[in-house]
Image (spheres, grey):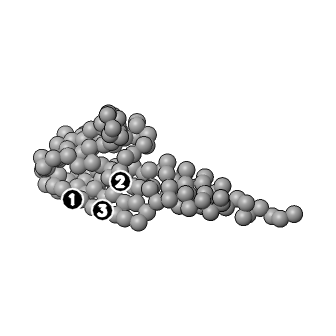
């Protein structure tokens, strides 16, 4: 049973991810943005010109979709996170708002927003602790 908790904990931790969106603007419509999404064993990057950005929006849960942040570009929508994110809704709204403010303010030269998915790590560590605790107890 302990092994099951340990395996389950590692499995949950593998779902943890970080999404970072960074933009640098050299002139009002010149520069690039980079979206980096990474997890335990993977990473992906997407670059886009600043002048293609239209804004961002936090979309509430509807139908069978999970809540998410979407970045709008002239080429279409780009999800901020590659998986469902069950993080703090206020934080997600703030991220979308900061991206949209950057788009509207051509004088702002730099933006970096980041979202860490701590939920999977916390639950995974609890499961690992339950699995390892009996091994750490001293025998009397």
What residue is pinned by disc 3?
A: 44
Seen in the picture, residue 57 relative to 140 is either above or below; the reply is above
Question: In terms of secondary structure, where does tag 1 sit?
Answer: strand
Residue drawn at (18%, 56%) of the image = 48
Query: Nearest the camera: 39 or 74?
Result: 39
Where in the figure is residue 37, as x and y percent of width and height?
33, 57
Q: Quadrant of the C terminus?
A: bottom right
Give the mark nearest the N terminus, 3 or 2. Answer: 2
Query: Quick check: 72 left or right of 92?
Result: left
**Residue 58: in sight, yes or no?**
yes
Relative side of 129 to 140, left or right: left
Instruction: Kindly state the secondary structure of the residue where label 2 is placed.
Output: strand
Instruction: Indicate the secondary structure of the residue bearing disc 3.
Output: strand
Q: Residue at x 66, y 60 (%)?
A: 2
Q: x, y percentage for residue 57?
A: 27, 38
Residue at point 17% right, 43% down? Answer: 54
Distance from the alpha carbon under mark 3 to that under mark 2: 10 Å
Mark 3 and mark 1 in contact? Answer it, CB < 8 Å.
Answer: no
Q: Nearer the viewer, mark 3 or mark 2?
A: 3
| Left or right of 100 in this view: 10 | right
For disc 2, the marked residue is 19
Q: CA distance from mark 3 to mark 1?
A: 10 Å
Q: Nearer the viewer, mark 3 or mark 1?
A: 3
The disc at residue 47 is: 1
Give the x, y percent position of residue 31.
17, 56
On residue 124, which mark appears? none
At x 37%, y 65%, the residue is: 42
């Amino acid at each position: 049973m302990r092994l099951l908790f340990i395996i389950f904990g590692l499995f949950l931790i593998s779902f943890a991810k970080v999404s970072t969106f960074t933009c640098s603007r050299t002139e009002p419509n010149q520069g690039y943005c980079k979206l980096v999404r990474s997890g335990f064993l993977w990473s992906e990057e997407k670059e886009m010109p600043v002048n293609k950005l239209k804004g961002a929006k936090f979309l509430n849960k509807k139908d069978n979709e999970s809540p998410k942040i979407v970045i709008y570009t002239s080429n279409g929508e780009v999800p901020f996170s590659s998986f469902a994110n069950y993080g703090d809704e206020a934080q997600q709204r703030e991220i979308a708002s900061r991206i949209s403010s950057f788009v509207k303010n051509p004088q702002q030269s730099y933006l970096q927003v980041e979202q860490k998915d701590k939920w999977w790590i916390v639950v995974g560590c609890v499961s690992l602790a339950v699995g390892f605790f009996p091994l750490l107890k001293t025998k009397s």
